[in-house]
Image (spheres, rainbow, N blue to C red):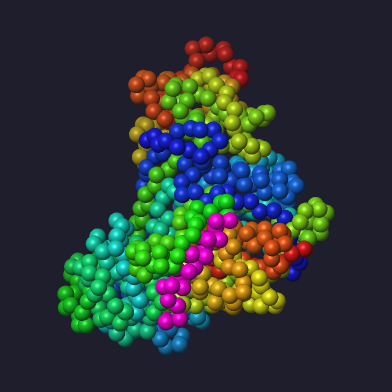
Amino acid sequence: MQDVAIVSFVQSDCVRYAGAQNEVELIMPVVQAALKEAGLSSVQDVDFTCSGSCDYQQGAAFAFVAGVDALGAVPPIKESHVEMDAAWALYESWLKIQMGQAESALIYGFGKSSPGELSNVLSLQLDPYYLAPLGVDTISLAAMQARSLLESGEVNEVDLAEVVVNSRANAKNNPHAQLSGDFTVDQLLAEPETVSPLRKHDCCPISDGAAAMVICTVEKAKAMGKPYAVIKGIDHRIETHHVTLRDLCRSPSVEIAAEKAGVHDAPVDVAEIYAPFSHQEIIVKRALGLDDSVAINPSGGVLAGHLFMASGLSRVGEVAKRIIAGEYKRGVAHATSGPCLQQNMILVLEGM
Amino acid sequence: MSLESGSATDQQVEVLSQKFTLGFTYTRSTGPVVGRFLSSLRDGKMVGVKGSDGRVIVPPVEYDPVTAEALSEFVDVADTGEVVNWCWVAEPTEHHPLSHPFAWGMVKLDGADTPILHAIDTQGDASQMVTGMKVRVRWLNQAQGNIKDIVCFEPGDTSSGNIPQHDFEEPVVMMDAPTYLDYNYTAGNATARYLHQIRQGKIVGQKAPGGEFVYVPPRGSCPATGVATTEEVECADVATVESFTIVHIPIPGNPIKPPYVVANLLADGADVSFIHLLSEVDNDAVEIGMRVKAVWKPEEEWGYAMDNIRYWKPLDNESDKGGK
């Protein structure tokens, strides 16, 4: 495996309603900024472009094809798309570089959830015979996962509230965050349960926006003369599609991916965890084997702003950014997809 | 379309939005395993399948989740069981099976080793819900051959005895699985600006600053360069036929009676064509390069849509074949 360098990362603000911005208008600013930050003048300067998005979010069929209009793809470019979070577009791009088919890549993810009802849209990813016809929604599934964790006795509702307190406090330093501020555990626990045992603040907000990143070989990054972070390891694992057949308190896919990505090979000092629900941060942190010395979600994580289809890429970008700035030395980025942390990707990032 | 105020884009424009429902009216084949389960429901029976490790999986799955072995050993289980996990839905949506507050529950049926997920009805009373409680299936009166033959679970430790009626004997091999999603779609900034002009009876294309091409309709960027089309260029309601097709078959949902002509039209002043209708012309006389003019609806009928133009018809002066 060759090291791959992350040379730029740009994310839009997380906003509940992006109003009159279509996919092209969401993508253009972040792509242009990411290219500029990498010292590139256009998409023609990278070997490969890959994006992640989901058309069901805004109900516009093939919105990802329209999204290509944001790039400047004349003459035609090498381009691909995953109907997944853009972290998986990063994975495809990383593979392209490993295979020697590209030396550099532009990755972007975008999501406009405001036109639809995300929780119901996500019912469509469930079993089409047994679950989707019932209208089982993601928040309800997450609530059952939270209950199994709470009733295991290993975690209590104070632990869940602390995750939210930390997220919102950290998000005060994140200009793109949708939710931030100083809260206490008592304050949060005084709120009513919305889908018991979850309270509203245990669930991520829903955000519109986009994110973009440029990666390349280390040789190329050196030639560009830009500071960069290095992807030292990456692994992706998936669990069964049948949510009732899983032990929802644990994440074996995170455990294996962490092992394979080399999380445990050296100390970690920062981690960005993609946990749309507070209890999921606890599950992932435990599965990663991280102790309390590790800074978790210094950006605030997705509880502070959830760019569905770009949040996984943002986790990687948030770690990379801090390593480049010299704030941390070795970090873990986590991306997830599917109900109740069904599939998970783990990256290990280090400095130059 | 409705108008809303407020926008966070560079060029302020009223947001145009349109509510719509997206329907996926799929029919799904069940296969032998799911079909066996769905077929048994009409007889008021629950059936599971034995996994590779001998545990009884309900509802049955086609392949073992650990070994991936194909599974086929069916086992009858009870329609009563125990709640092993649940959450409370205080505000049900139209997508949910019950309209009053209810629980989703994972219920391990008597004789099963894995839970089934379904709704639990305690008549809106959350205080009755507790992990470990006994529940039974409430059956639909008239079986339909899908998972909704189980209306929900309800508290109780013995079967209700009310099994479904049904009037079909053949095994279930197909099921209707329609899905409907509601959206309030918003036009992009560039499109909204364009539609505001169409509302005024003007075709106003857009180009990127310093860009070469004028786009009608604009979609936000110059695709060739990836730069936002912030400049507006008014085009004529006169166009040149770039290509066309004559539609002879009726299109479901389309009120236009075939045969009719659909053409790619390049408006004077624009660099890309759009698609619209040609009429008031002998279909056989339509040709590439033909000059046409917009036939607008009466002004009082104008909205934020391209059908403000009813169709295009040949220019009176047929010798004008110049283009832009």
Q: Quadrant of the image for the N terminus of chain A? A: bottom right
Q: Quadrant of the image for the C terminus of chain A? A: bottom right
> Residue A2: x percent and y percent?
76, 67
Q: Residue furthest bottom?
A: B54
Question: Is residue A328 located in the magenta-colored stretch of the structure?
Answer: no
When the figure is inspected, residue A155 is found, relative to residue A229, above or below; the finding is: below
> Residue A253: x percent and y percent?
55, 74
When asked about the image quadrant of residue B120, the answer is bottom left
Q: Which residues are magenta?
A: A152-173
Answer with left or right where residue A189 lies relative to residue A213.
left
Answer with left or right where residue A308 lies relative to residue A186.
right
When the figure is inspected, residue A107 is found, relative to residue A2, above or below; the finding is: above
Answer with left or right where residue B231 lies relative to residue B69.
right
Q: Majority secondary structure of the magenta segment?
A: helix
> Residue A42: x percent and y percent?
71, 43
Question: Which residue lies at the image location 61% right of the left edge and 20% below the top edge?
Answer: B324
Asked if one can make out residue A86 in the rendered structure from this viewpoint, the answer is no
